[in-house]
Image (spheres, rainbow, N blue to C red):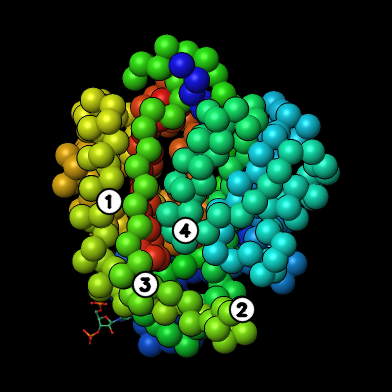
Amino acid sequence: MIRSVVRGVGTALPRRIMKNAEFETLVDTTDEWIVQRTGIEQRYIAADDETTASLGEAAARAALDHAGLTPDDIDIIVLATSTPNNTFPATAVEIQQRLGMHHGFAFDLQAVCSGFVFAVTTADAHLRAGLGKRALVIGSETFSRILDWTDRTTSVLFGDGAGAVILEIEENQGTPADRGIIACSLRSDGSHRDKLYVDGGPSTTGTVGVLRMEGREVFKHAVGMITDVVEDVFAQSGITADDLDWFVPHQANKRIIDASARKLGIAEEKVVITVNLHGNTSAASVPLALGTAVKDGRIKQGDLVLLEAMGGGFTWGAILLRW
Ligand code: UT7
């Protein structure tokens, strides 16, 4: 059986850290409210010279270094982002060019906060279909560019950053004990479009627009949708919450993460939390959390890891893999 195995992971963050206290001078909020309601203590904000492409390139280079590979070894680049450098071409081809790569193919994928989970699932399907041997999957975002900085209900929640993994096909027995991606589950439902969207676009306003969200409505649906796809990957694989070594959820709100883990019966000490450090970085949040937990030695080769995300669309998805 052919499986896509993770060979390396890398992350990149803008230079500037913005603490909650800074928002107290911008909007009617407090550090205490932000920490209590979301778990966020700080986020990183990109400077003018830091873009989705430059952060994505830095994360890609870190993942290549971690894997001991070079761009020559990569056949496919999939970039998950909702904040591309330009409407077109795809920011993935800009990253391809920055990496000095003239072979293979690169494209962007847009599923907002679920983008990385959708991109890994898509890259896995490409690899197993024989379209390449190795894929570079990146989540990179500069949400600071699409925020309404006068809106306290959204501006305090998001941050910028990037994370990347290298997937490589490997022939193995395909049992839950073997390395690689074991099961994936993707969903979307466009009837929830108006609960989380950007109020501009090339084909409508001709502007970039800013993020609009009915936070309470998103919150209400999040836990049920997350547990739905996680239970699907459990059912596909015969794996249970007790078997997991690590749960790496989308980092939007610590209360959503805690409630999802509780509902799924996942022990608190298995949950990777980085929302306090990064805020919600949309498609970058899962690979940033993964990279953090690999770098600090928590996630090790052979560990059973569960990824999930939920966001605009709505879109939601989960991936079960043996690291
Ligand atoms: O990654 C994509 C998925 N996105 C998410 O998962 C986000 C999901 N939603 C959430 O995380 C939460 O709903 C929020 C963090 C956005 C809001 O938390 P909440 O506990 O649902 O608060 P709320 O929206 O019910 O608002 C409670 C109060 C309101 O005031 P009133 O109406 O009770 O007087 C808000 O106006 O808190 C007020 N509020 C704030 N107060 C101080 C909203 N934002 C702020 C703020 N500072 N920044």
Amino acid at the residue labelled 4: Ala
Query: What SS does tag 1 mark?
Result: helix
Question: How many other residues sit within 10 Å of disc 1, few (<14), some (14-19) or many (≥20)?
Answer: many
- Marker disc for residue 111: 4
The mark nearer the N terminus, 4 or 3, is 4
The residue at which mark 3 appears reads as 193
Report whether 163 appears left or right of 73. left
Task: Give the CA distance from mark 2 to mark 4.
Answer: 17 Å
Task: Give the CA distance from mark 2 to mark 3.
Answer: 17 Å
The residue at which mark 1 appears reads as 226
* Horizontal and vertical percent position of residue 58: 69, 48
Question: At 75% across and 67% down in the image, what residue appears?
Answer: 49
Q: Are marks 1 and 3 in contact (CB under 8 Å)?
A: no
The mark nearer the N terminus, 2 or 1, is 2
Query: What SS does tag 2 mark?
Result: loop
Q: Are marks 4 and 1 in contact (CB under 8 Å)?
A: no
Report whether 24 appears left or right of 214. right
Q: Are marks 2 and 1 in contact (CB under 8 Å)?
A: no
Amino acid at the residue labelled 2: Pro
User: The C terminus lies in which quarter of the figure?
Assistant: top left
Q: Point out the residue furthest to the top here.
A: 173
The residue at which mark 2 appears reads as 202
Amino acid at the residue labelled 3: Arg
The mark nearer the N terminus, 4 or 1, is 4
